[in-house]
Image: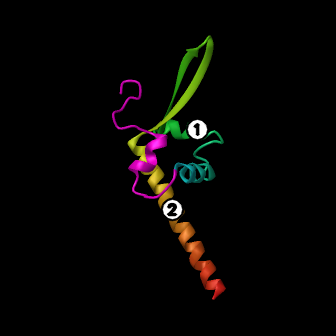
Amino acid sequence: NKLLGSKSCVDLDRVTQVIKFHNLSNTDLYKILRSRHVLDDNNQPYQEYCDRKYFRVVEAKVVVKGEVIRQQRTYVYKSGVSFIEKILTEYEVRNHDQRNRKASYDS
């Protein structure tokens, strides 16, 4: 908690378990966040969103057999979870509208 600065952080890999959008896979979540330019190609948040206190990236270094292995974990603050839910709502509405328009064109 001291490292993250908050007890209310969630690992990015677990966000799909705590948001109100059920049946959403991590793969789909990451794809949506990349399309909205929130995450880069490595599924790391851009600095702008870390500065807004939505995400926190923590790097851990471990030495295994003389080799330094680095691992980055992304944590999401409560404000980031709300931000993600807002993006997903907009995404859902936009896709729903597109499906309705397509259905009316097909009729």
Does 101 appear above or below 53?
below
Which image quadrant for residue 32?
Answer: bottom right
Q: Count all numbered tags in the image, as a single digit.
A: 2
Which quarter shows the N terminus? Answer: top left
Q: Amino acid at mark 2?
A: Glu
- Residue lying furthest top in this view? 66
- SS type, badge 2: helix
- The label on residue 44 is 1
Residue 11 x, y percent position in the rendering: 45, 38
Looking at the rendered image, the disc whose residue lies closer to the viewer, 2 or 1, is: 1
Q: How is the image coloured?
A: rainbow
Residue 50 x, y percent position in the rendering: 51, 36
Please tell me whether the stretch drawn in magenta is mainly helix, strand or loop.
loop
Does 16 appear above or below 59?
below
Label 2, residues with CA under 10 Å away: few <14, some 14-19, many ≥20: few
Does 34 appear above or below 58?
below
Does 29 appear above or below 49?
below
- 13 magenta-colored: yes
Q: Which residue is mark 2?
A: 90
Residue at horizontal 57 percent and vertical 48 percent from the top:
30
Q: Which residues are magenta?
A: 1-25
Residue 93 x, y percent position in the rendering: 51, 67
Residue at horizontal 55 percent and vertical 29 percent from the top:
72
Residue 63 x, y percent position in the rendering: 57, 14
- SS type, badge 1: loop
For marks 2 and 1, the one nearer the N-term is 1
Residue at horizontal 59 percent and vertical 41 percent from the top:
43
